[in-house]
Image (cartoon, rainbow, N blue to C red):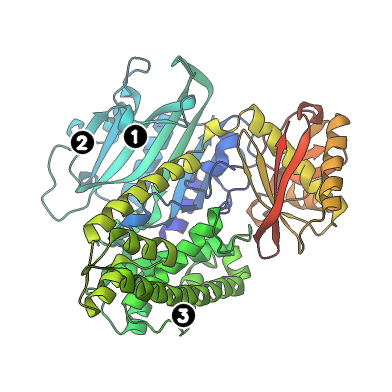
Amino acid sequence: MNLKDLYINFFISKGHKQIPSAPVVPENDPTVLFNTAGMQPLIPYLMGQPHPYGTRLVDYQKCIRLTDLDNVGDKTHHTFFEMLGNWSLGDYFKEESITWSFEFLTQVLNIPLERLAVTVFEGDQYIPRDEVSANVWKSLGMSEDRIAYLGAEHNFWIAGESGPCGGDTEIFYWRSSDPIPKKFDPEDERWVEIWNNVFMQYHKDKNGNVTELAQKNVDTGMGLERVVAILEGVDDNYQTSVWKNVIHKIEEISGLNYSDYSESMRIIADHIRTSIFIAADEAGIRPSNTDQGYILRRLIRRAIRHAKKLNIPIDSNWEEEIANIIMDQYENYYQEIRKNRNVVLSVLKEEKGKFNRTLEKGLKEFEREVKKINSNQIPKDIAFRLYDTYGFPIELTVELAHELGLTVDTIGFQEKFKEHQEKSRAGSEQKFKGGLSGDGEMETKYHTATHLLNAALKVVIGPDVHQKGSNITPERMRFDFSCDHKLTEEEKTQAETLVNEWIQEGLEVSIQEMPKQEAIASGAECMFIDKYPDIVTVYSIGDVSKELCGGPHVKNTSELGHFKIQKEEASSAGVRRIKAILE
């Protein structure tokens, strides 16, 4: 039995209900490109909305994080990973949560106590030191030497500047063959964090005032890849059972050894896996130059660049061979992989063809630029343009230059690259901050407006129109929908007019819980039917819209103001995009 099954079965035995993994593209959190943690899809329920499955939940969640993209290629980093999590929504709290985590690690996974250590929140001027968690750990046999008290930077969680918050306790494992020290030093990198239990106990307002929450929640998370590496006794995640077949296939295709070419093989394995999960998602993401599509394109092209470094014939079906092994491994857990297998293979193949043509253009650009330079060195600006526009890794530019007896300003290139990274990271942090603070008054209005627009498009274009994604800020909404043509001016005007008529009618927005099949039979629309539990939340707007959704929404459409479409454009093949505002 693998780790996912062991985890789920254990927490089911403790009264938890398994909930399905949410899609990697979030349906109801438009502040982020991808689900980055197991708790993200549960935000409405952590805020107090009743969950259809009750107050004890467990799952394994597909997550994509891009903050570590440049570190992929080492032993431990991934862009896609699976997060094991269990939650208490106002049910049990610190004692049960810590006790069950300890029981699972020491009795189910048989990890010796002497290899474990923990951190707890040391407190600050607002919140007392977490002696409750420390005392639970002591009662389970953890010595005081293995408990470290750390400040808010390490052991305190809040989503944004205000909102639900609380200390956490993190569990560490001694991942080394060196003698285990008696005293736990959190700065010693041989101690590796494996599990985090967050206790949402307080609410902090914008002035820093802290009050106790009526509903105290527990949110835990354990990274599957890291724990599998620990259980299998290796210090390289890519040498575990999660990756062995994939790495072996890359060795076979390239005729090279992993030990000699580990960085490129890790990047190919990681990026193909993440690309599979993005392309298989029901949101219908395809390679493009914006948002999720841009990330998908970047991942596939980076994998291709490293395949070229391994001298893999790019025109062969190498990406299909690797992808099939990965999909075989995951299709029993994630049905969208089985359902969209051919779509994934098509996306990978088409993008490979496009990138090969781009590389050819890049080579011509290289030849043109070389003829212009008056020295023996290719300047940093040219090297960076080849990287940024044509996807040339600096190694390829250096190699081509060397063949002509030239050098490259690699130091200048690295400076430009670092500057580019910092700009990207700043933008990424804005895009990815998300969390519980993301649903203000305007965001809530725009959530409701997307439902009205969806209903209007079904009237104007036809019943086969379905939502494919949305992105909302306090300033505007963006709505992606299935459609095979550019909307005419008349169609846009009709949709806009319909939405405004419904707003002026002052339609009530009602909420109801019901069995999923009953909701579908009643005509309720939803974006990802497979991800919903058996009991679902349905939002109805008068008799014009009925959708499965996690909220939040206004109580009456009269609160929305005036709806105005600003732009309609292509998003990807068969998907159009409308940008609109509420005035």
Q: Quick one: label 2 or label 1, which is nearer the N terminus?
A: 2
Quadrant in which the N terminus is drawn? bottom left
* Residue 346 x, y percent position in the rendering: 58, 75
Question: Residue, x 60% and y 75% (percent of image)?
Answer: 342
Q: Which mark is residue 146?
A: 2
- Hey, which quadrant is residue 230 in on the image? bottom left
Structural distance between the alpha carbons of marks 2 and 1: 12 Å
Relative to residue 8, is residue 386 drawn left or right? left
Task: For label 3, count other residues whose C-alpha is less than 10 Å away and answer few (under 14), some (14-19) or many (20+).
Answer: some
Circle nearer the viewer, 2 or 3: 3
Q: Secondary structure at mark 2?
A: helix
Q: Which mark is residue 351?
A: none
Relative to residue 401, is residue 95 drawn left or right? right
User: Circle 1 sits on which residue?
Assistant: 169
Question: Residue, x 28% and y 58% (percent of image)?
Answer: 413
Circle nearer the viewer, 3 or 1: 3
User: Which amino acid does the dot numbered 2 rest on?
Assistant: Arg
* Residue 128 x, y percent position in the rendering: 34, 17
Task: For label 1, count other residues whose C-alpha is less than 10 Å away and answer few (under 14), some (14-19) or many (20+).
Answer: many
User: Which amino acid does the dot numbered 1 rest on?
Assistant: Thr
Q: Secondary structure at mark 1?
A: strand
Q: Choose between 134 and 546: the one closer to the eye.
A: 546
User: Which amino acid does the dot numbered 3 rest on?
Assistant: Glu
Relative to residue 559, is residue 224 drawn left or right? left
User: Circle 3 sits on which residue?
Assistant: 321
